Amino acid sequence: MSSVRDTQISASALAIAQEAVAQAVNFGFKTTVGDAASVEALARLDRQTNEVRNQETARLLARSIHAMQNRDFAHGEKLALEALERDDKLGVAWHVLGIAREKIGDFAGSMRCYEVALKLLPDHGAVAGDLGRLAFRMDMPEIAAKFFMHYINARPGDLEGVNNLACALRDLNRCDEAIEVLRPAINDNPEQPLLWNTLGTVMCSLGDGKTAVTFFDEALRLAPDFGKAYHNRAYAKLDLGDVAGALADCDLAIAAVESAEDLATMQFGRATILLALGRVEEGWKAYEARFSTDLVEAPRFTIEAPRWRPGMDLAGKSLMICAEQGLGDEVMFANMMPDVIEALGPDGKLTLAVERRLVPLFRRSFPQADVFPHKTVSYEGRVYRGAPEIEDWSGVDLWTPMGDLLETFRPSLAAFPDRPNFLEADPDRVAHWRRTLEDAPKGPKVGLLWKSLKLNGERARQFSPFMLWRPVLETPGITFVNLQYGDCDEEIALAKAEFGVDIWRPPGIDLKQDLDDVAALCCAMDLIVGFSNATTNLGGACGAPIWMLTGAASWTRLGAEIWPWYPQTRCFITPDFNDWTPTMQEVGAALHERFPAG
């Protein structure tokens, strides 16, 4: 029956999933627990088949479950489908099919099956738990939280549900609620390492690395082989600048790993820790872990050409490069493009696939290259990236993700050139913005960036609370210009109300979409102050003066106190995400020194 075989993710879930497409791979803390295909879960489902009235349908379901017990999930899916073709109102069959599809990687189809099972089964707590874990795995914490709450309502006090709900609330930046969920569970079950570990991740999200380490220590005292606790403690240590300690913990985590997905996550995290230590060449070699097929969010490339590997000669070749990760990384990694063009030589040819909004800027910057937009789509819970506007692949000798070139062209800090810029802003638009800025209040024009568009629980701690910008914003004689994309009305109103500062908004520009014009606006600034996000990277790549606010062990500094990608950048490094006050005071004092007369 086609309605069963063609099950797809619901419209609401799909919309949220698509919003997450093209984000950088997440290698931080993921501490939900439970497995839809655990021995206990499958045994429970097997018992439920005894309640199926039609004996042939019951036999099909029992065989499906037996196949999954033997880890043959593809056969399990086939048998579950046969059962549903006999009775498409059988909730337990939809649940079994959902598990099979989740395990073969069809996450979207799996979610749809779970949703149908949830409606059909009277005792649906287990289904809600499976749905919540899958939604969480697909980076949909808001949906996950709803299903975890459903699970807890069906099973009050269940520690798996408590833990998982706290994880989802944490990733929604609802950390106070997460703590209130965990507190009574820990009071009643202080011997449970899982709960201490999850509480530690919540404290990490709040930027309190010191307290987080204490909770991870307790989790590991209770369970010395708890790999995820070592992994999470590594990130707390990174927040505190203890990079060597983070590497040691990451190695302990890998030694105690429990699943292929956890191993891939930890290996990718280890690569960035090596980079943060300044072990650059080694780090780039390990960076290949970002494409592990065991990482749900890792992109699969749909490109019709042989793949280039480090060590292969480029001279005279026709090379296609596809940008990867987030938009900021696309810009940052383009630092290598002049060197790649030189390596290809006069007989070589370069084709670039970049984020659509970057195409005009890259075409101007690299006129020797053919520049196309890449396209990223989500299908069955996986992310796929290709370059469909490239119609003729016959002339392409090799292709590579942009990051693979780093091992060859940026194997050390010394390999970064002292180049004023590598992207070229439109000179006419730079001139336009300089004229426009004359209409702003007098004084040096300092562009501000204070957040990223995506601020989940793992990332939010890396940005100073806006109230702490007071020492910067109260610097006299400066005109602060809003370069922050996204919704920033609240912060701009707060600056006026609390600090008496009008942050000037440039007219006639969409700071999220008009990236070519944003690059030109950045180049018209006297200075840009902010955190690493898409706009900061655009400004730095085009040669604008940047003051970068960064954490103690940011891997993109490659173990140095400089920002090697943009040599004109000055870094202000906070030793502790829990207290940005000294860093913001330092930036304010530096502004006074840079613009003493305002």
Image (spheres, helix red, strand yellow):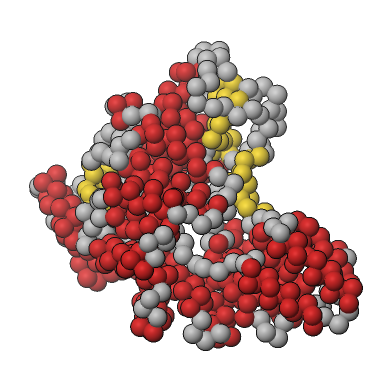
- Residue at x 69% of width, y 58% of height: 71
Q: Pinpoint residue 540: horizontal percent, then vertical percent.
A: 33, 39
- Please say whether residue 283 is visible from this viewpoint: yes
Q: Pinpoint residue 171: horizontal percent, then vertical percent.
A: 44, 66
Seen in the image, is 551 located left or right of residue 32? left
Q: Above or below — where is 160 with respect to 6? A: below
Q: Pinpoint residue 586: horizontal percent, then vertical percent.
A: 15, 53
- Residue at x 28% of width, y 46% of height: 244
Front residue (pair 540, 111): 111
Seen in the image, is 265 located left or right of residue 416? right
Front residue (pair 489, 286): 286
Seen in the image, is 393 located left or right of residue 351? right
Q: Above or below — where is 461 with respect to 159? A: above
| Quarter of the figure with residue 99 | bottom right
Seen in the image, is 367 located left or right of residue 73? left
| Quarter of the figure with residue 523 | top left
- Please say whether residue 526 is visible from this viewpoint: no
Tag count in the figure? Answer: 0
- Residue at x 43% of width, y 31% of height: 406
- Residue at x 57% of width, y 71% of height: 132
Name the quarter where the N terminus is drawn.
bottom right
Front residue (pair 264, 190): 190
